[in-house]
Amino acid sequence: MNKKNSKNILLSGKRVNFKRVEKSDLKILQKWRNSDEIWQFNTQFTLLNMINQKEWYEQNTQKISNRIMFMITNKIGKSIGICGLINVNSIDYSASIAIIIGEKKHHNQGFGQEILKLLLNYGFSKLKLHRIESDVFEYNENSLHLFKKMNFKQEIVLRDSLWRKGKWWNIHKFSLIRNEFKNDF
């Protein structure tokens, strides 16, 4: 990795780094979020255009934003996804997890666990959050497994809350409290 890329790293793990989202990332984000592989696991229900992406970027760069987003790169600096803490609530010290591994070849390779650990460590240690939650679609078996493996507790099931693939699906709400997080980084 060159010196320019290493200066942009905000968080670093064993196989991935987090860097600031830049305007130059918007085109790849649009491609990922509009792909069938990603769209089916995302809460968005419409395809995104560059106007949507630029508005999203501007909202994220405001001093007062309830989102903290990171581009995920591999160790040689290639972008492989995006993640962050959304719905950050500084009164209740809570947030929700958002992770998209956009490059399909990196799916089912264990990156999700490392990304989730980095986000949890950031949220609980740096932001001093008390609670972090996630909504997982019933058919997203990989994410259901990941959140259970990471000690998240399933709180509720929102029955028939999502229309995808021509039918209704449940959404599972998971949460993790700071003292339940085992930081083994």
Image (spheres, grey):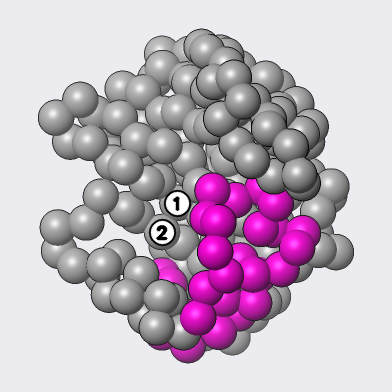
Task: Kindly identify which residue carries mark 1.
Answer: 84
Marks 2,1: beta carbons within 8 A:
yes
Q: Residues within 10 Å of mark 1 (few under 14, many from 20)?
A: many
Residue type (three-letter) at the residue carrying disc 2: Met
Of 95 and 181, nearer the camera is: 95
Does residue 184 appear in the picture of this structure?
Answer: no
Residue drawn at 47 percent across, 20 percent down: 176
Say whether residue 90 is left or right of residue 149: left
Residue 109 in the image: x percent, y percent? 83, 49
Task: Kindly identify which residue carries mark 2.
Answer: 69
Q: Under tag 1, what secondary structure?
A: strand
Residue drawn at 24 percent across, 28 percent down: 93
Residue 123 in the image: x percent, y percent? 37, 38
Chain-order first, disc 2 or disc 1: 2
Residue drawn at 64 percent across, 41 percent down: 163
Residue 24 is a magenta residue:
yes
* Quadrant in the picture for residue 87: top left
Say whether residue 48 is left or right of residue 60: right
Residue 55 in the image: x percent, y percent? 32, 75
Residue 25 in the image: x percent, y percent? 51, 81
Quarter of the image where the N terminus is located: bottom right
Does residue 161 appear in the picture of this structure?
Answer: yes
Residue type (three-letter) at the residue carrying disc 1: Gly
Task: Note whether 110 is above or below 72 in the view shown.
Answer: above
Q: Which stretch appears magenta?
A: 20-49
Disc 2 versus disc 1: distance between alpha carbons? Answer: 4 Å
Q: Residues within 10 Å of mark 2 (few under 14, many from 20)?
A: many
Task: Note whether 170 is above or below 125 in the view shown.
Answer: above
Quarter of the image where the C terminus is located: top right
Residue 35 is a magenta residue:
yes
